[in-house]
Amino acid sequence: MNAKSFVAEKDGESVGDSVLRRLRFDIIRGALLPETRLRLEPLRATYGVSVTTLREILSRLVVEGFVVAEGQRGFEVAPVNEANLRDICELRLLLECHALQRSMTLGSLDWEAHVVSAHHKLQSVEGRLMSGDPTSVEQWVQFDWDFHHSTVSACDMPALMNTHSNVFDLYLRYHMLALNFRGKPAADEHLRLRDLVVARKTEAAIALLTSHVRAGMEHILASGKFT
């Protein structure tokens, strides 16, 4: 995933990169369920690329953690379980807390404005979800990413940011499979996080981010789908 869009085409993007992004998103949103065998011919017909290109894409998704290779048997969507989610959660916090600290030290006024703008969009879609509109779930996933990414976007460590983006996607996959928005507590935490970040209250912001992410993880596990 990226900060602009899960599925929108981007200028100068190769066919292979476009299909990689689409296939990753289909795994994240559960269109391709965990442990589904990824047969090359059906995938070729669905995504419109050659088998050779598909093999390259699937190999990249293996590295990213969305697909597992079965030796001579091919590929399947990576499984999900509680231990894996807890591992991903802690890795996300390790990366995101460090990136947040760097951003709050280095961020400009434009960075603050970006945080506020991203939160405004997230708050809007969270309001619709809390009003019972289930069609907003995928949009919420995008805006949740946009907001959290905005808070760390002033971090000056590209390798950390690229790794964080991938780990965030792995975490969101569980959110999408659970299909259960945490509701007002999550929305309230996002609002408080916005205010702490803009006020440059680093210690309090990191503490809130940590409790926010772990509460989200426990909410996902409470669905009973990953035990």
Image (cartoon, helix red, strand yellow):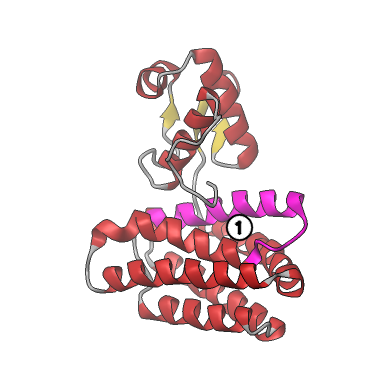
Residue at 56%, 20% (x, y): give it.
55
Taking depth in this image into account, of 160 and 72 the one nearest to the observer is 160
Residue 14 horizontal side relative to residue 152, left or right: left
Taking depth in this image into account, of 61 and 205 the one nearest to the observer is 205
List x then y, in percent, for residue 211. Answer: 57, 78
- For disc 1, the marked residue is 88
Residue at 70%, 81% (x, y): give it.
202
List x then y, in percent, for residue 178. Answer: 37, 58
List x then y, in percent, for residue 200. Answer: 68, 82
Residue 189 horizontal side relative to residue 48, left or right: right
What amino acid is labelled 1 in the image? Ile
Above or below: residue 19 compared with residue 200: above
For the question of whether residue 46 can be seen, the reply is yes
Which range of residues does the magenta coloring cover? 152-176
User: Which quarter of the image is occupied by the C terminus?
Assistant: bottom left
Secondary structure that dominates the magenta span: helix
